[in-house]
Image: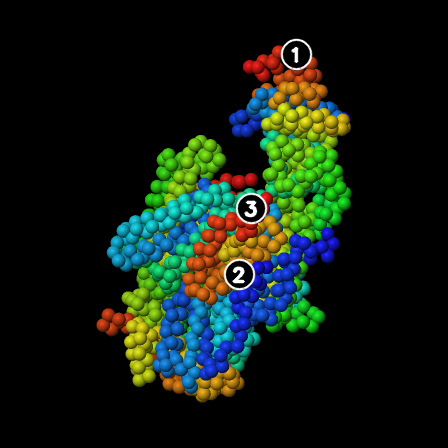
Amino acid sequence: MKALDVQALSKNFGGLRAIRDISLEIEEGERRAIIGPNGAGKTTLFHLISGFLFPSSGHLSLFGREVTTLQAHRRAALGMARTFQVTNLFQKLTLFDNILLGVQAIKWARFCFFRRVMSFREIMHETERLLKEWSLWEKKDVLLKNLSYGEQRQIEVIMALATKPRLLLLDEPTAGLSPAETASVTSIIKGLPREITTILIEHDMDVAFEIAERITVLHFGSILAEGSLEQIKGNPKVTEIYLG
Amino acid sequence: MAFWIIQILNGLSFSMLLFLVAAGFTLIFGLMKIINIAHGSFYLLSAYIGLTVLRATENFLLATIASSIAVVLVGIAMQSLFLRRFYMKELQQVLLTFGFVLIIADLCLWIWGGNPMALPKPSLFRGSIWIGSVVFPSYRLFVILVGVIIAVGLWIFQEKTKFGAIVRAGVDDEEMLRGSGINIQMVFVGVFGLGALLAGIGGMIGGPFVGVFPGVDISMLLLALVVVIIGGVGSLRGAFVGSLFVGLTDNFGKALFPELSLFTLFAPMAIILAIRPTGIFGKIEE
Amino acid sequence: MKVAEIFKGPFLLPSFFAVLTILFPFLFSNYYVGLVIQIFIMAIFAMSLDILVGHTGLPSMGHAAYYGVAGYATGFLCLAGVKNFWLVVVLGMGLGGLTAAFFGLLAIRARGPYFMLITLALSQVLWGIAFKWRSVTKGDDGLPGIGRPEIGMGIDLKPDLYFYYFTFAIFLIVLVALFILLNSPFGYTLRGIRESESRMKALGYNVWLYKYVGFIFAGIFAGISGALWVYYSGFVNPSNFGVDLSVKALLMLILGGSGSLFGPSIGAGIIVLLENLVSGFTERWSLVLGIVYVTVIMLFSEGIFSVFKRGRN
Amino acid sequence: MIMSMFLFSLAFGNRGIAEAAEPIKIGYLAPYVGVFAKFGSDLRDGFKLYLEEIGNKVAGRQIIFIDEDTEGKPEVGLVKTKKLVEKDHVQILAGIISSGVAYAVRDYVIASKVPLVITNAGATKLTQEQRSPFIFRTSFANCQQDLAGGWYAYAKMGARKVIMMGSDYAAGHEKAAGFKKTFKFMGGEVVEETYPPLGTNDFAPYLAKVANYVGKVDRTWAFFAGSDAIRFVNQYQEYGLKEKLKLFCEEGVTDEANLPSQKEAALGVESYARYCIGHDSSENKRFVREYRKKYNYDPGSLSEGGYVGAKFIVKALEAVKGKIENQEAFLKALRSVKFEAPRGPVRFDEHQNVIFNTFIQRVEKKDGKYNNIVVDMIPDVDQYWMPKK
């Protein structure tokens, strides 16, 4: 069954045609990277897939279900999670509360208003487990704004995983990280369970090749090339647009 | 027949006054995104200062100049010394303006007392003129004239001058304006001063028929709010159309079915709020 | 946390004040007892607003709308002979919530300054109706002669002393209710929305729905304070919808520190005391208040305790 | 919760005031802001004039006069009344201009058992269905002189059809009802009634409608108070209606307090009033002379209302030798006070509302000054007065 099926998708901002007639199919469990120079339309494509933007034309279906005009939170409820290129977390809340909101997002308990969160055992334990697994437990009471940029990038990924997604969209997860931090985030992503389909936007070619099995190259809003690592490495057009 | 002409002229004169007050209010909100609760206080202060100068010199023009200068200085001081510190923090700025309402209102009460007063009309427009079989005060025609002149002036300022273009850009996308290297704080001071000036002129124009009394600041603020919501937030065209609508509805409401008159003001506002929260010409801010 | 823990640790200071407020009426004249009743009622009103401002990041400038609706409901019911407090206050809360449900549909679409403008405008629509619909609301003269209610158990609320303890009890109930509401999953979600709506949407939360339900809760709790005020003063008129009331509630949050449990109550205490005691000393009390408000915002824009908090972390 | 600490230190132990010949505290409520501001200060000046005449002392006890501003708003009036009773512990309350404020404070005054002597607010029900032994009125009920006016318009002025314009608050509607009752009783017809809101600045829309009735009705009845009255009379002349459709209004419209701002616009306007400055009794001449000497402006009906209110209270205090604490005796004494006031003989009816003669007056200009002169007088008018057909 296809995790994501994109049919002739395009998006115009007034005169600017940001996404031109893109079709894309990603199998369940696959690890796809979308690469391309700045302004190729990578993040816009992500917004269209995740429902933050609605397409001018074309269709989009998630695990076989038509979602073209479905609101962002409804798509997330179908098992899609995403991270943001610019860190987008709850700065004035503690690390524990941040992850808790992720864990709670898929539980019915989230609507409860007459019992304190602490009384929901499974939410508290799940949050604790996640934090311990990522060895961040001792920083659980620190306000997020007091954590380093590197840690915050890591938490973006943890937050997405907290909702137990079937499809994970990662928007430049290693942007602005030191080589050591990049290595640790890359190994975390590689270590994800196989059944989670992962789509990765990456500016850095090496990271893309490290994680993904297939690559799609985007250029001025349309697909320049698509294929396995070897096909893309050997493709002259790809090297041309990168080396320019 | 004369009844309708009189009513339309009455309505128009009130509309022009509303336009002066609403135009400043909507400019300040459009660009700086704050609800200036102290906007009515400019009307109050200007009318009182104008009254004092008029009593001393009997010269309406001189009084208008004096009160306008005073009010603009107060406006600029309020923006550059206080509101500026809370740039991008709308809630704190709005609450600050509420503090100024209390200060200005009580100072005026202290200096000019609590007795409602009316400014004497300019000597040229004291009489009344005949329209058909009915008499109509000439001062109200003067008010309509001043309103139209200022409306045209503002239109030219906004469409033709450089500062006008900057203000329009700011209203549309303030972040972009900041990005383009223009000193945004100077633009804010300019707009706040202009808003104060307009409300100040409104105070002088409204002085003779609406009068000046403790509480007129809040009632003027509410009227400006109704005009801006109906006409469209942040747009001068909206303020003009809104003030025409409100001025005429209020006037005909009072004349034809008086017991509902205030309600005829708020009902259209409620309807427009339900359909299009930022008014006819306003921009939807999702 | 079991109940016992509540009165240990962080709750030591507030429980000391609780005991003090119980002894209070025996130490002060009826006038100050009346003042503290006003503080309790205003604290409930400010706490209800804080659901929106402090926890959801929605700066409502028309919160007096629900306070006034519940006030008029109390007035009409009482004049129609309904004496039972619980029935009236539940109806007041219901009407407050209903008004918020209707206004929420209009206001929640907008954001930040536009949200402030629309909520302000909506509350003034109700002011206009109350002021103008003379045949029903008696306009500016309002509805006088609203007696104190009966709460069963044979307690007569006419003397301010009993009404004092009754209002204090309602204040505590609201405090605990809000403590639970704001620490429930729903409360956490509201704070998540305050911090970043887009992140919450990406996690799968229906952000509009939570804001809407939060808006209704704020209306319901505001209804309690609206009803209590009318029972305390025995009078309601269009000023119960006043702009000054909505703005004063915002000031209480800024002063006491929004987003905290006791912030709104502290802010309410300071402002009610300021208004009544300052007017006792000088005829220019409104000028003094204006200056105090401006100075407070300039110095403690995150609330009076932000100065200490800044030091701590 | 810091307010408990704050209060604890502030007000501990303010009980137990020294015994000696305790002063008598009178709490006074009047508006010094807004539409009724001028009326408020007139009412206080008249009240204080009498207190000064008796040296602020009754039976050896000092009188302390504590003054609070109601801003003419019912909710503010209630808060200030509570402050006077609970904080200042006043023994008598007096004043109140607006009927709205009077209704708002009624229940609290009765509950706290402090006698209230209303020196202006004509709220009718307070001395009728909602009367109480604690509430007295020395000014007028909101239909009292209007009943006489309605009869006079029909019987003496020959008016058959009128239009009516009143201020849209308690007093406006109650006074209109009084005038309508006797005018219709005599056979007159009220063609139209309009009630512009209190504090209307711009009467233009209403006056344009009045212009339609020129030649179709005999009189325009009007009741507005304070600054509304000033604007109404001025704009009535501005729209050229003064000559074409004569006004016949309640005294508040062309009261002495308003004449300096109305001047020419009020000349010749007739009204019915409980007090007229032109009344030539020795007591009135003395009062007018003293008032002008102390405040150098002309006393209007509000000034006289304040003066008479103070005299009623002091006369009752003298009757009980200053023992205000014996409330039963004080109230009984107050009920039976009778004396010759500037407006003429005054006494209370059994519902504790004052009885007086009603004047018909007209504004005349004499050596540059505008004043009301007496045209006619209807004796002994009380709040239930009806003409004999």
Element type where label 2 sits in the image: helix
The residue at the far left in this view is: D367
Marked residue chain, label 1: A
**Amino acid at circle 2:** Val
Horizontal relation, residue A186 to residue B115: left or right = right
- The dot on residue C272 is 2
Quadrant where the N terminus of chain A sits is top right
Task: Decide which of A220, D207 is in the foreground and name it.
Answer: A220
Marked residue chain, label 3: C
Horizontal relation, residue C31 to residue A81: left or right = left
* Nearer the camera: disc 2 or disc 1: 2
- Image coordinates for residue D362, horizontal then vertical, percent: 32, 74
**Amino acid at circle 3:** Arg
Marked residue chain, label 2: C
Q: Do circles 2 and 1 both sit on a common chain?
A: no
Quadrant where the C terminus of chain A sits is top right
Res B104 → quadrant: bottom left
Give the labeled residue for mark 1. Answer: A234
Element type where label 1 sits in the image: helix
Task: Decide which of D88, B58 is in the foreground and name it.
Answer: D88
Q: How many marks?
A: 3
**Amino acid at circle 1:** Gly
Q: How many angstroms separate mark 2 from mark 1 (CA)?
A: 76 Å
- Image coordinates for residue C224, horizontal then vertical, percent: 62, 60
Q: Residues within 10 Å of mark 3 (few under 14, many from 20)?
A: few
The residue drawn where x is 38% and y is 41% is B190
